[in-house]
Image (spheres, rainbow, N blue to C red):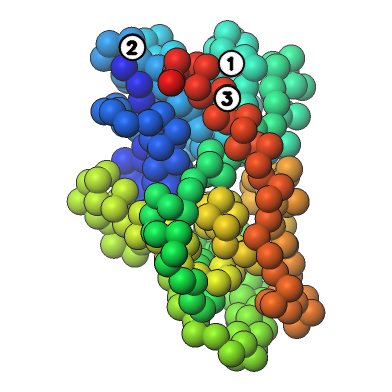
């Protein structure tokens, strides 16, 4: 049976495509069908085995997927703002049909179990990435990579306006001055910390400002991002799909949680916080980079993910 992975037609977030790369590597060599996360209900091709992982979803009215899709749920996260819609009677029946559901976080696991859906914590497929897939193991590490640290502290009111979400836009407009002030203060604390380190600093963003032409271009950009992570001595970020790949690639990581108190953000971290150091920028002064070592706490999740995919897709 053909195999498929999730992709993201309208996303400029390289973290999404890093998940696609991890899923494809799990399935091994061969051709895969890439199915857009928001359009699984429209699939009309031949019967297909699909690794269903990642954040779901922007358009819950597009759930559940088409009948021709045979899913393996791993690293599955339900967006809290659409949980009620995704767990409609039809949504619950679909998940029960394909249980147990491998959840990326404890929030999703608890949510499904409250609806009598069998679920377990699988963490994220990006934890299975290997450094040797992107750079030589002899490639030296150099400097600090600051990758999408504190970006979420500044509200994206333009996106809300374009989506015609008028009330949320108005709320964010009201909160914007205080949020900008907090972001400024956090960035100043980060800059002070960086100025005290005797290492080269590289900055990058997980979010592309300009959309690329097609999925392949995004996958190339995501691989380049992974190469940067693999070559860093330390990564500082506020994005889980920078932090988790860093763990997988053996790169020490500091996760800054300033501004991530909202349930939509906090829910995505439940069950993953033991995998990397987490702190507020106010605590950065207490961190000695020399004492940071790569985590190995993800290895049980890696073994679980490999076992599940090998069995489901009949891999050799």
Numbered disc in front, either 2 or 3: 3
- In this rendering, the label closer to the viewer, 1 or 3: 3
User: How far from the left and from the top, in percent, is residue 241?
Assistant: 53, 52
Q: Nearer the viewer, residue 85 or 103?
A: 103
Circle 3 residues within 10 Å: few <14, some 14–19, many ≥20: few
The quadrant the C terminus occupies is top left
Name the image quarter holding the N terminus: top left
The structure residue drawn at horizontal position 34% and vertical position 64%, both measured from the top left corner, is 209
Residue at coordinates 53% horizontally, 42% vertically from top-left? 128
Q: Secondary structure at mark 2?
A: loop
- Label 1 Cα neighbours within 10 Å, binned few <14 / some 14-19 / many ≥20: many
Q: Which residue is mark 2?
A: 1
Q: Please, is residue 59 above or below residue 93 in the view?
A: below
Using residue 307 as the reference point, say whether residue 15 is left or right of it. Answer: left
Secondary structure category for the residue under label 1? helix
Q: Residue at x 45, y 41 (%)?
A: 22
Using the numbered discs, state the Cα–Cα distance from disc 1 to disc 3 in whole angstroms.
21 Å
Q: Position of residue 301 (x, y in %)?
A: 65, 36
> What is the distance, in whole Å, between disc 1 and disc 2 at their CAs?
21 Å
- Quarter-wise, where is residue 308 in the image? top right
Residue linked to disc 1:
95
Q: Which mark is residue 307?
A: 3
Q: Are marks 1 and 3 in contact (CB under 8 Å)?
A: no
Tell me the element at label 3.
Answer: helix
Q: Is residue 25 left or right of residue 168?
A: left
Q: How far is mark 2 from mark 3, CA to CA?
A: 19 Å
Say which quarter of the image contains residue 155. Answer: bottom right
């Amino acid at each position: 049976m053909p195999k498929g992975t999730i992709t993201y037609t309208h996303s400029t977030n390289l973290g999404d495509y890093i998940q696609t790369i991890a899923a494809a590597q799990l399935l091994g060599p061969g051709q895969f069908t890439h199915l857009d996360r928001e359009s699984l209900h429209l699939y009309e091709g031949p019967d297909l085995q699909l690794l269903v992982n990642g954040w779901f979803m922007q358009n819950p009215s597009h759930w559940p997927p088409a009948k021709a899709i045979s899913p393996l749920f791993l690293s599955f996260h339900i967006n809290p703002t659409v949980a009620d819609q995704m767990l409609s009677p039809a949504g619950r029946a679909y998940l029960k049909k394909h249980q147990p559901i491998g959840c990326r976080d404890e929030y999703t696991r608890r949510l499904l179990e409250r609806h009598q859906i069998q679920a377990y914590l699988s963490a994220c497929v990006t934890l299975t990435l290997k450094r040797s897939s992107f750079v030589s193991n002899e490639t030296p590490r150099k400097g600090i990579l600051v990758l999408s640290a504190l970006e979420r502290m500044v509200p994206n009111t333009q996106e809300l306006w374009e989506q015609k979400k008028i009330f949320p836009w108005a709320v964010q407009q009201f909160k914007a001055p205080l949020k900008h002030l907090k972001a400024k203060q956090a960035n100043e604390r980060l800059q002070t910390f960086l100025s005290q380190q005797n290492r080269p600093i590289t900055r990058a963003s997980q979010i592309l400002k300009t959309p690329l032409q097609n999925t392949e271009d995004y996958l190339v950009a995501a691989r380049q991002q992974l190469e940067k992570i693999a070559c860093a001595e330390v990564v500082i970020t506020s994005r889980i799909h920078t932090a988790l790949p860093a763990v997988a690639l053996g790169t020490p990581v500091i996760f800054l949680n300033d501004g991530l108190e909202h349930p939509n953000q906090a829910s995505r971290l439940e069950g993953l916080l033991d995998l990397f150091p987490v702190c507020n920028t106010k605590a950065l002064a207490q961190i000695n980079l020399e004492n940071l070592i790569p985590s190995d706490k993800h290895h049980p999740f890696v073994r679980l993910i490999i076992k599940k995919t090998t069995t489901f897709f009949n891999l050799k």
